[in-house]
Image (cartoon, rainbow, N blue to C red):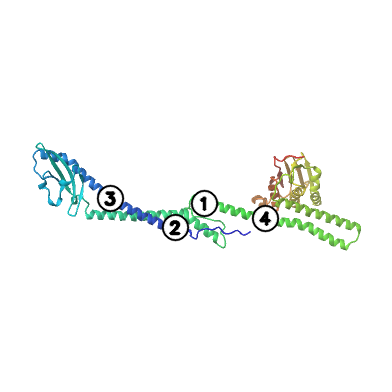
Amino acid sequence: MNHEPVTTSNSSTSSFVGQLSVYFGIITIVTAALIYLMMQFMLQWVEDEVSLNNLRDSAKYVISEFQSGAAEPLVLPPNITAYYSVQYIPEDYGQLQNYPLGFNAEINDDFTELFLYRDEFLLDGKLTPLYITMPAENIELSPQQWRSMSLFTLSFIIGLFILFGYVITKLFRRLIEPINQLSLQMSQATCPKEFTVSSKAAKEFGILTDSLNSYRQQNETLMKQEQAFARYASHELRTPLSIVLGSVKLLGKNAETEFQLRQRDRITRAAQDMQNTVDALLNIVKQEKSADENPPRELSEQELEQAIETSIAQAKQQDIEFIIEWHQTPVIQPNNAVLKMLLTNLINNAINARIELLDTNKQSYIKLIVDADSITLEDNGQGLSMTEKNTQGHGLGLVIIDTLCQRYQWQFSLTENSPNGCIARLKLPKNVKNNQ
């Protein structure tokens, strides 16, 4: 079945970085503009508040001076002037008497900018108005000061641009660049031996890269195992098929009844071997794992001997002593075809590992030990090869055993035997019970 590609946006990580830079630039400009406006507002507000507080706080001193006979206008350095008579107020200040009592604010008109504090006090027993003024131009920031503030704001904007650029660069190296590296490595015609990312990338990308490498290695291992399994299966079927074809040719050349009976017997055994192999392979590829399909049962000595009858005969032909030690009856779930394939494979490996020249008074042997929770095969052959020691599955020839053991939750182990040879152990699961 063809899967439709996942729908994604047309933008890449590079365009994302460009968009991110534009967003940060806009944020920087807006932030700088807000800061500039805020600084202007705050400076003007502070200017006004300081001036108005000075006027209000100087009222007590002005009143005491006027009551003491001070002449008006009363000037308080550096730029505060107090009046109580309207005729002394400069004409460009306007009609200050029109402002209500308690007025304390800045006056802005076409002619002047003035801070005014309006109040009244007792002078010679009469309530007399009080006007305390301060010209605004004397306390406001000069053009040079405003230029300095603008220069500071501009420097602040440039600093923000540099800071955000640094942040984008760090973000790109830790979050965006690793994605680009992995994407580039995956899109190459020939994938690298392993995926890598920069050491400056975030920790999660290192975990992701390690997982990709692990999954890739597992896939390669599974592919090799599948190829080895296919070669083994074809070999197992090719051998009995060759026997069948050879026997059929011999039947056509010799018409003796006894000879034909022997060839028929060979054909029957070969066909049975092929059937057992096919049944075992079907047990591996079946998806359903129902307990009713292969209910647990007790393994009898007769079933065991029938399963390994051919292998025992091959061992004796190679002058190998075959010993069966039966301690307790195990409970197993695999059918006879699977059991035969497991044991036959192990026995054939032990036969092939036989040492041609043993020391004097020593005999090549294969010992099959049957217990309630395990089936063990021991030999005094050549032992484990380097491939079987260093590769998972103990070599490609035993992949079939690993696959069958996984199917029925058996545990397979292959260890050295002292002083020589090896020990293959099939450990049965403890949760299998006899349903008979």
Q: Nearer the viewer, mark 2 or mark 1?
A: 2
> The residue tagged with tag 3: helix, strand or loop?
helix
Point out the frontmost of discs 3 and 2: 3
> Which mark is first along the chain, 1 or 4?
1
Q: Where is residue 281? Give x, y as percent.
A: 73, 53
* Dot 2 alpha-carbon crowd within 10 angstroms: few under 14, some 14 to 19, many 20 or more: some
Q: Earlier in the sequence, mark 2 or mark 1?
A: 2
Relative image position of residue 42 (x, y in whole percent): 28, 48
Residue underneath mark 4: 226
- Which of marks 3 and 4 precedes in the sequence? 3
| Distance between the alpha carbons at the discs numbered 4 and 1 | 30 Å
Pick the residue in front: 290 or 109: 109
In this view, the residue in front, 412 or 40, is 40
Neighbour class for label 4 at 10 Å: few (<14), some, many (≥20)?
some
Q: Amino acid at mark 4?
A: Glu
Q: Residue pushed farthest top? A: 125
Q: Residues within 10 Å of mark 1 (few under 14, many from 20)?
A: some
Residue picked out by circle 2: 17
Apparent side of residue 388 relative to residue 255 in the rendered image (left or right): left
> Which amino acid type corresponds to the residue marked 3 in the rendered image?
Phe
Q: Are circles 2 and 4 on residues that touch, CB within 8 Å? A: no
Quick check: 198 left or right of 121?
Answer: right
* Camera-nearest label, 4 or 3: 3
Q: Which of label 1 and label 3 is nearer to you?
A: 3
Label 1 secondary element: helix
Out of 137 and 395, give the one closest to the viewer.
137
Residue for badge 1: 206
